[in-house]
């Protein structure tokens, strides 16, 4: 008896393919077209299992993931993406020709089957096959005989094999899907409208990032893949949509690392007549709702590294965190003293680094990564965020927070700046000599009057990383960007 059909011979992929091609031709000669049409099923395998009743007739379809030959009978496992179900094939039941043809099938082939349900002596629910049809011949073998695709690069480049062979990977992406469904459900329950804004824009605005540039030949002009949808969503606030969000794809022509992919998913939310405190309540409720509904818990992981999402979450000002790390007198020191102190802590800073640049490097490299439990970092320097409203009691800071969890920024939020004159001054200062970088159409919209509002962006990929315990952003993106081979 073969425990499983295997391909252990010291052959290359070309030999495997040649053998499968030969099997395909034999099946064709036996009357089994190698690439069939639609096959009506009783239901998905998970549904068949849920409604299991002995002797009931069923029709099912899926991929053969194991084949165990036992002379005049064969046990095999069928997988359709929802469940894995045993099937039983007997020569006496099928007939000699159909049984002989079934023996030509390979692991990976897609088949449709019809038969009756029964329970084996081992207690396993099984379909006794009365007829079968070939739906698609697999010409290449599955990785490592269904024991999992181990090569990391191959897992990302051939995600379809990763999904076939690694159940834990399938579960991560099913969890991602459920997270996004719950985000939409939560926001709908709060009266938010889901909208769509341009992904190709004449000006790349709403964030400070290097854009991807393309050419729109019909208009004879350069265009940019958006780095953020912010400026268009604010136009909708002007237009009277008081609660809007977009689950959008953003593109930033920057580096690849554990937490960055040049194409990523962002949830951007705007609500009129509120401020950053409204956004704080919203994100705390949103994330705890999603965690509870999808995972059934607010504690992710175990032991000292466990992430506890139980509210209320910690809040600390940017200044407080910097002084905790670098000393209470940090802001009283000269630029040169701060530069020396930062370098002594291992930071690579240019000689002409500005005071704000030095301090922010300290925050990003020494402080942020230590913030494991949910922390709202508030009152950031105004120079860093030109689209946010200044704090009423301190012109040097803006009314914002950055939600940091497990050392990653998950959600920045602002009390939005709705003064068109101040907004123009800030954008012009940011643009410097590049006057064309100022979005005049956005400023025109502001001059028609934008209500006070709170706005927030949520890094969906990073949120999924947190909730699934994934270590790299590529593990939660189905098809991440990779270097060409």
Image (tube, rainbow, N blue to C red):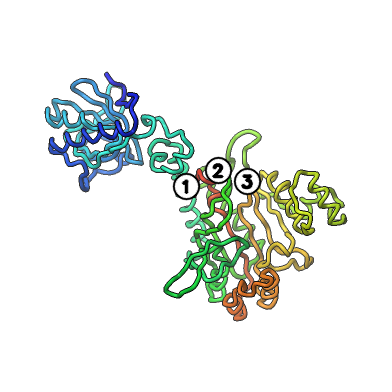
Is 144 rendered above or below residue 391?
A: above
The residue located at (65%, 46%) in the rendering is 407
Query: Viewer-nearest of labels 2 and 1?
Result: 1
Query: Viewer-nearest of labels 3 and 1?
Result: 1
- Which residue matches tag 2? 472
- Which of the pair 55/71 is nearer the observer? 71
Left or right side of 293 for 107: left
Is 187 rendered above or below residue 321?
A: below
Left or right side of 247 for 305: right
Query: Viewer-nearest of labels 3 and 2?
Result: 2
Residue 92, quarter of the rendered image: top left
- Which residue matches tag 1? 484
Give whichever of discs 2 and 1 has the lower sequence position.
2
User: Mark 2, residues whose alpha carbon is within 10 Å: few (<14), some, or many (≥20)?
Assistant: some
Q: Circle 2 sits in a helix, a strand or a loop, which is it?
A: loop
Q: Position of residue 196 (x, y in %)?
A: 47, 66
**Badge 3 vs badge 2, beta-carbon distance below 8 Å:** no
Q: Circle 1 sits in a helix, a strand or a loop, which is it?
A: loop
Q: Is residue 477 visible?
A: no
Q: Position of residue 284 (x, y in %)?
A: 61, 53
Q: Position of residue 9 (x, y in %)?
A: 32, 24
Q: Position of residue 406 (x, y in %)?
A: 64, 44
- Which residue matches tag 3? 310
Left or right side of 456 for 400: right
Q: Circle 3 sits in a helix, a strand or a loop, which is it?
A: loop
Between the residue at mark 3 and the residue at mark 2, the CA separation in whole angstroms equals: 24 Å
Between the residue at mark 2 and the residue at mark 1, the CA separation in whole angstroms equals: 19 Å
- Which of the pair 228/271 is nearer the observer? 228
The quarter of the rendered structure image containing the N terminus is top left
Between the residue at mark 3 and the residue at mark 1, the CA separation in whole angstroms equals: 43 Å
Give whichever of discs 3 and 2 has the lower sequence position.
3
């Amino acid at each position: 008896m073969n425990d499983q059909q295997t391909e252990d011979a010291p052959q290359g992929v070309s030999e495997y393919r040649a053998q499968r091609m030969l099997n395909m031709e034999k099946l064709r000669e036996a009357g089994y077209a190698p690439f069939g049409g639609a096959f009506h099923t009783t239901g998905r395998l998970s549904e068949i299992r849920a409604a299991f009743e002995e002797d009931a007739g069923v029709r099912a379809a899926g991929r053969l993931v194991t084949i165990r030959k036992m002379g005049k009978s064969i046990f095999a496992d069928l997988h359709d993406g929802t469940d894995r179900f045993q099937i039983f094939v007997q020569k006496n039941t099928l007939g000699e020709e159909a049984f002989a043809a079934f023996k030509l099938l390979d692991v990976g082939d897609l088949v449709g089957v019809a038969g009756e349900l029964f329970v084996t002596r081992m207690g396993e629910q099984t379909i006794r096959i009365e007829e079968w049809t070939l739906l698609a011949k697999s010409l290449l073998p599955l990785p490592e005989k269904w024991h999992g695709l181990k090569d990391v690069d191959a897992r990302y480049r051939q995600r379809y094999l990763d999904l076939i062979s690694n159940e834990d990977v399938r579960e991560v992406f099913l969890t991602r899907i459920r997270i996004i469904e719950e985000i939409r459900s939560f926001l709908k329950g709060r009266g938010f409208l889901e909208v769509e804004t341009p992904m190709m824009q004449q000006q790349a605005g709403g964030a400070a990032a290097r854009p991807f540039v393309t050419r729109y030949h019909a208009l004879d002009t350069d265009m940019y893949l958006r780095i953020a949808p912010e400026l268009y969503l604010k136009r909708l606030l002007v237009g009277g949509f008081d609660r809007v969000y977009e689950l959008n794809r953003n593109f930033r022509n920057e580096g690849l690392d554990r937490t960055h992919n040049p194409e990523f998913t962002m949830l951007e939310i705007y609500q009129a007549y509120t401020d950053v405190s409204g956004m704080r309540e919203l994100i705390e409720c949103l994330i705890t709702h999603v965690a509870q509904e999808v995972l059934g818990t607010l504690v992710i992981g175990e032991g000292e590294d466990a992430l506890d999402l139980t509210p209320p979450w910690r809040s600390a000002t940017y200044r407080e965190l910097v002084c905790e790390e670098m000393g209470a007198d940090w802001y009283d020191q000269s630029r040169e003293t701060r530069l020396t102190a930062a370098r002594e802590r291992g930071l690579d800073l240019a000689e002409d680094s500005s005071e704000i640049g030095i301090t922010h490097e300290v925050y990003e490299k020494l402080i942020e990564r230590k913030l494991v439990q949910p922390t709202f970092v508030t009152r950031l320097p105004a120079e860093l965020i030109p689209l946010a409203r200044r704090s009423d009691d301190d012109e040097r800071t803006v009314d914002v927070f950055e939600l940091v969890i497990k050392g990653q920024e998950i959600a920045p939020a602002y009390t939005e700046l709705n003064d068109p004159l101040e907004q123009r001054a800030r954008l012009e200062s940011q643009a410097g000599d590049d006057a064309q970088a100022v979005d005049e159409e956005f400023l025109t919209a502001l001059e028609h009057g934008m209500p006070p509002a709170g706005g927030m962006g949520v890094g969906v990929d990073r949120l999924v990383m947190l909730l699934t315990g994934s270590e790299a952003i590529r593990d939660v993106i189905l098809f991440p960007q990779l270097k060409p081979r």
